[in-house]
Image (spheres, coloured by chain):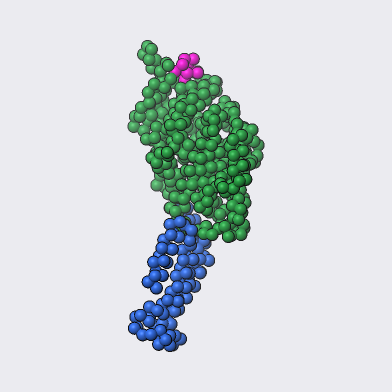
Amino acid sequence: MTALTPVLWLYFQNGRAKYQESTTFMLVMIGIVLSLVLVYFYELAKQAPLMEVAAEYQTGSLLDSLYLLGYLIIGAALYAHRKHQDWSYAVVANAMEPS
Amino acid sequence: MRDSNADNVVDQVWSTALDKITKPGDLPSGRPALGDQMDLAAAQAGTAALLATVPAFNKLLYNSGYAASARNTYLILRRLGMPADFFWKYEQWNPKRALDTLDKIVSKVFTTMLSKQHVGVLKLTAADPVTNRFEVSFESCAECSGLHAHDPMCFFHAGSFAGMLAAMLDHEFDAWEVECVALGAAACRFEIGERTDRQTQTRWGRWADEFTYAFEPAARFQEDLDGETVRELGETVDIGYYQMLLASTVLTNMEVVERSCLDAGRNIGTKLADIVRERFGADPQEAVPAFYRRLRYASLDVTGLDSGEASGFRVVVSEAPEHLGVLESSALVPFLSGELEGMLSALTGRDLALATTDVDGHDLVLRYAPS
């Protein structure tokens, strides 16, 4: 995880600098990564082995909430990705109206 | 090397054009007497004369339009709040989505700006994101309506449209004109392709290299003064367009074109003298101001100077677009001063030359003396 964070950060910075990457696409990726790695953060925070922590899945635990959070980020980002142009166009159209 | 101060002035002119749409109440007219419109013929004369007389001016016009448009399209879209990834991966869009999305933005922003300035009506008519080929049509084109040519002549707009797409799609494009109002077409039509594409290079090169043009200012101004209709958008254009044209082409290339502007202006002024005499009288002090007022170009006060060998004219110029607003400190008057030089010389039958140029408040004071 320590190695992954700066890689994601650099990827994001590079994409923004070159205007080659989509913010919403980046959020989808962040959601996927979080859904995979949040369990390890949880494991570190609880100071318990992974096998023991994994037993908490689907029991209404905080771990389930974290897992769902990752998927919610993916879902929200996919929705935003789909609506991105409409929203952006609305911003431009609104800015073109006389104030 | 490009002059960054000149680029800043160009950017301010573009920004003012946007402000006129988004903040109309915040911008008082810089021309209380003449208003914000000027006759189209007056706005066309300078570039048309330079196209006819200066070799490769068409390429300079194109490149100036491209550079100014690419930079300012980017600035305008960011200022309007468009995210940088709006056209993300557009190469993978289907042609219909590419055309619809691009046309929405072009229509909302650039067609609005150009129509409000009475420059023309822009429409994106074709888009192929796979081959990066686009087509735009431009009705009522301010660059060529009322002019007559053997070759398509709208280099400034071709460069502007290529620069506009370049900034939006982050590619280098070139545009070439395939139909032109100056050749009798209903609208100017431009094709745009990627700069690295061999066919684009061939077609743009052929258009730019083989271009020839002969400008007849007397015929164009005669038509204008007669009130003839040359386009649907009207016979006037916003001074912002003229300022944009001047700043983008002349100001950024002042060292190269200053002498040519003076000569071209003098040539036009000489050719227009007969029309001025015929329509406004033989007295330069009355006729010249009346002519420029009729064109809604500038308010002039022409005074004869009778002091022996120094006899000549003192001309106080107010509300001229090239000495107004952000251009006021740019000394962008070689064309106007040359035109007055030619006109006053022809009207008086004496060889007059510009002796001094001074600034008095917002006015420009030009003194002409026998050369």
* Chain B: colour as depicted: green
- Horizontal and vertical percent position of residue B112: 52, 48
Does residue B191 lie above or below B280 as drawn? Answer: below
Which residue is most to the top?
A: B308
The quadrant where residue A11 appears: bottom left
Residue B327 visible in the snapshot: yes
Residue nearest the viewer, comparing A6 with B363:
A6
Compare residues B210 and B327 and report the one nearer the observer.
B210
Residue at figure coordinates x 50%, y 58% from the top left: B86
Residue drawn 53% across and 33% down?
A: B57
Camera sees residue B37 = no
Residue B52 pos. (x, y %) = 56, 29
State whether the magenta stretch is mostly helix, strand or loop.
Answer: helix
Number of numbered markers? 0
Q: What stretch is highlighted in magenta?
A: B343-352
B245 w.r.t. A87: above or below: above
Name the residue rendered at 60%, 31% in the picture.
Answer: B212
Residue A62 appears at what percent x and percent y? 39, 83
Q: Which residue is drawn at 43% across and 35% down?
A: B251
Task: Check if residue B123 falls in the magenta segment.
Answer: no
Would residue A30 appear left or right of B214 to someone viewing this image? Answer: left
Residue B363's image quarter?
top left
In the rendered structure, does residue B344 fall within the stretch colored magenta? yes
Which quarter of the rendered picture does the N terminus of chain A lie within?
A: bottom left
* Tint applied to chain A in the drawing: blue
Percent position of residue B49, x then y: 54, 29
